[in-house]
Amino acid sequence: MTLTFWMLCFAFVFILILMIKKQMKIDRKEIALDLENKKIETLLKSQKDSNNYTDFTDSHLYQ
């Protein structure tokens, strides 16, 4: 009876550790994706700003 109890405790702890490791892996991927999205948004914003450049001497739009 005692051996079964300790085996169940070990299995529970083992599964818990595996679940925590999996969640940490998912969190790291989400952080990496968030950083990548931020870079892309910055690049798109800078591209949008550069596409709207106007020379103020003759008011022509240069692209």
Image (cartoon, grey):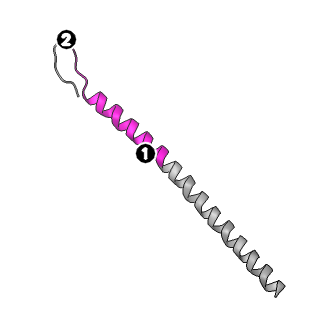
* Residue type (three-letter) at the residue carrying disc 1: Asn
Residue 33 colored in magenta in the image: no
Query: In the figure, is residue 45 to the left or right of 10?
Result: left
Task: Name the residue at 72% across, 71% down.
Answer: 13
Disc 1 residue crowd, few under 14, some 14–19, many 20+, Cα 10 Å: few
- Outermost residue on the bottom side: it is 1
Query: In the figure, is residue 22 to the left or right of 48?
Result: right
Label disc, if present, on residue 37 of the rendered structure: 1
Query: In the figure, is residue 34 to the left or right of 51?
Result: right
Label disc, if present, on residue 57 of the rendered structure: 2
Residue extent of the magenta highlight: 34-57
The mark closer to the camera, 2 or 1, is 1
Residue 57, percent across and down? 19, 11
Decide: is 61 above or below 43. above
Residue 50, percent across and down? 30, 28
Asked if labels 1 and 2 touch by Cβ distance under 8 angstroms, the answer is: no
Task: Specify the principal SS of the magenta part.
Answer: helix
Dividing the image into 4 quarters, which one contains the N terminus?
Answer: bottom right
Q: CA distance from mark 2 to mark 1?
A: 37 Å
Residue 58, percent across and down? 16, 13
Decide: is 27 above or below 8. above
Dividing the image into 4 quarters, which one contains the C terminus?
Answer: top left
Residue 56 colored in magenta in the image: yes
* Residue type (three-letter) at the residue carrying disc 2: Thr
Decide: is 33 above or below 61. below
13 or 25: nearer the viewer: 13
Query: In the figure, is residue 29 to the left or right of 37?
Result: right
Task: Name the residue at 70% across, 74% down.
Answer: 12
32 or 59: nearer the viewer: 32
Residue 3, percent across and down? 83, 84
Q: Quadrant of residue 51?
A: top left
